């Protein structure tokens, strides 16, 4: 929240003054050591010709969401004010995982550089480990050159193959390559070595003689401020993706660069803005810039077929289940509030932007994933009363349905009474107040399904489930599709 306030203040400063921004970053920023052990402080010194009580130094992931272009992209992981024309200070690394980071020295609660940013590496004196001890890499095709990597999963390690078929090579940087001659699972042992010890993992490559990706596992995942709200969030995110053998992800609350950070660790492809992203085990070959405030889309090459994946994050306030369960509004009032929230306009804009994809979906299947911050008309029915209500035609679900998109979870589980599919919330069991309903604080939090994987095109739902990833206040939605 402080960084959000800083953004507002910075925008006002640009509007009202000639900001010293685009003055040269003529100060200095020096770190005592370019490498520190996790849990130790990053100590630094600074000088500037533009002293200000609210000059500050912030730490970001590298590559990450730092103000590369001297503009807000996402919040810092940790920060400290640095008043005066010179001095020294420290940034805590408590709770941060090993990896590459970057330090920025910035002007007056804003994002103007006062000095050139400085990279720094956080290391661990604990024995190295893979986020998962056994996992699967992207598929391979018989007779085709193959390339994947495990190099980002154990930062700073050198890698070696310990077992597996002769066609597979593992370089010291973690690159996995070769050309398979026959179909089947290639099981490869890999060792990672750092100065603190070794770690091993069993890695599988599925070699296909037919379609490269006969099944695709798709996830819609609100990361909860990029995963920063949970200790060891990045490692837990990687563990979830690896152990669940995920192929493609629609991300919300990207926090500037979470998708990039995950892609760097996994060796995957990504496309992102500050709030939403597409993350893919397979190559991204085309992208659609931001639509309706935050939604993005990407075309993913699955071999014989491509896939278009949209990720959307709709407005969060006012929130319909609160208006229903606490405010006791009529259905007409609920729909009016949906419109005032912006969600109705957003979903209509997104579906309109998808029109070409929907028209081509007979050959290129389409997914619409997202945190819609609203329930589904398939759940609020006369047969399944929520807070005493019967049918409520929530627009964020009726509009996609009207465009021919199918709700994959509800297709797999048609009965909302036996399979509610709750995604909000894995963390909040009681209402904490706000939204105009402070008098209801302490009452049970209305639990609902507000995250979705919709689809259209030649796909068959094999299974769909909601998953507590242990990294978010939302459950993720994981749907397995057969690619027809």
Image (spheres, rainbow, N blue to C red):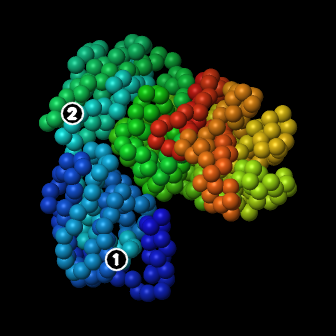
- As displayed, is residue 378 above or below residue 164? below
Q: Position of residue 364 (x, y in %)?
A: 62, 35
- As displayed, is residue 288 above or below residue 58? above
The residue positioned farthest toward the bottom in the image shown: 17
Q: Judge from the rendering whether residue 462 lies leftward or rightward of residue 222; answer left or right.
A: right
Identify the residue at horizontal 20%, vertical 48% (top origin): 37
Which residue is label 1 attached to?
54
Query: As rendered, which of 2 and 477 lies closer to the eye?
Result: 2
Identify the residue at horizontal 71%, vertical 35% (top origin): 406
Q: Position of residue 342 (x, y in %)?
A: 69, 60
Q: Judge from the rendering whether residue 128 lies leftward or rightward of residue 225; answer left or right.
A: left
Q: Position of residue 437 (x, y in %)?
A: 69, 60
Residue 417 falls in image quadrant: top right
Identify the residue at horizontal 24%, vertical 49% (top origin): 39
Q: Judge from the rendering whether residue 338 lies leftward or rightward of residue 212; answer left or right.
A: right
Identify the residue at horizontal 36%, vertical 23% (top origin): 134
Q: Which mark is residue 110?
A: none
- Which structural element holds mark 1? loop
Q: Position of residue 350 (x, y in %)?
A: 67, 52
Whether residue 284 is visible here, answered yes or no, is no
Query: As rendered, which of 367 and 34 lies closer to the eye?
Result: 34
Whether residue 210 is visible here, answered yes or no, is yes
Q: Cα distance, mark 1 to mark 2?
A: 40 Å
Which residue is label 2 attached to?
127
Query: How many residues crowd around disc 2 within 10 Å: few (fewer than 14), some, or many (20 or more)?
Result: few
């Amino acid at each position: 929240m402080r960084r959000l306030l800083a953004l507002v203040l910075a925008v006002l400063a640009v509007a009202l003054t000639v900001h010293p921004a685009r003055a040269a970053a003529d100060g200095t920023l020096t770190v005592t050591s370019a490498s520190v052990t996790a849990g130790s402080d990053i100590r630094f010194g600074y000088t500037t010709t533009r002293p200000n009580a609210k000059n500050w130094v912030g730490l970001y992931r590298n590559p990450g969401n730092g103000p590369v272009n001297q503009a807000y992209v996402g919040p810092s992981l940790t920060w400290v004010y640095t008043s005066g024309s010179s001095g020294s200070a420290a940034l805590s690394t408590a709770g941060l995982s090993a990896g590459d980071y970057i330090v920025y020295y910035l002007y007056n609660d804003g994002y103007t550089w006062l000095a050139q940013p400085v990279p720094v590496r956080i290391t661990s004196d604990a024995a190295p480990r893979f986020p998962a001890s056994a996992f699967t890499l992207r598929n391979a095709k018989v007779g085709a050159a193959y390339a994947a990597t495990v190099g980002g999963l154990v930062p700073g390690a050198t890698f070696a193959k310990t077992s597996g078929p002769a066609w597979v090579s593992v370089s010291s940087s973690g690159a996995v390559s070769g050309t398979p001659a026959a179909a089947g699972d290639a099981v490869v042992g890999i060792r990672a070595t750092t100065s603190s010890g070794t770690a091993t993992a069993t890695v599988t490559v599925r070699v296909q003689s037919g379609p490269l990706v006969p099944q695709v596992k798709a996830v819609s995942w609100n990361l909860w401020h990029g995963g920063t709200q949970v200790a060891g969030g990045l490692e837990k995110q990687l563990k979830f993706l690896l152990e669940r053998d995920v192929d493609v992800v629609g991300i919300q609350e990207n926090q500037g660069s979470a998708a990039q950070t995950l892609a760097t660790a996994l060796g995957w492809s990504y496309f992102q803005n500050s709030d939403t992203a597409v993350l893919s085990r397979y190559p991204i070959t085309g992208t659609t810039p931001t639509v309706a405030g935050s939604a993005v889309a990407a075309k993913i090459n699955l071999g014989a077929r491509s896939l278009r994946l949209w990720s959307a994050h709709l407005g969060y306030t006012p929130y319909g289940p609160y208006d229903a369960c606490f405010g006791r509004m009529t259905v007409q009032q609920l729909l009016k509030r949906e419109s005032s929230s912006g969600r109705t306009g957003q979903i209509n804009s997104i579906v309109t932007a998808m029109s070409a994809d929907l028209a081509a979906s007979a050959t290129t299947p389409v997914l619409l994933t997202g945190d819609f911050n609203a329930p589904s008309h398939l759940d609020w029915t006369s047969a399944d009363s929520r807070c005493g209500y019967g049918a409520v035609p929530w627009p964020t679900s009726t509009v996609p349905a009207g465009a021919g998109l199918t709700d994959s979870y509800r297709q797999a589980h048609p009965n909302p009474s036996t399979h509610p599919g709750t995604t909000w919330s894995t963390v909040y069991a009681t209402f904490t107040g706000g939204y105009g309903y402070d008098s209801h604080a302490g009452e049970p939090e209305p639990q609902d399904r507000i995250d979705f994987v919709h689809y259209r095109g030649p796909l068959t739902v094999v299974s769909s489930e909601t998953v507590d990833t242990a990294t978010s206040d939302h459950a993720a939605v994981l749907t397995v599709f057969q690619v027809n």
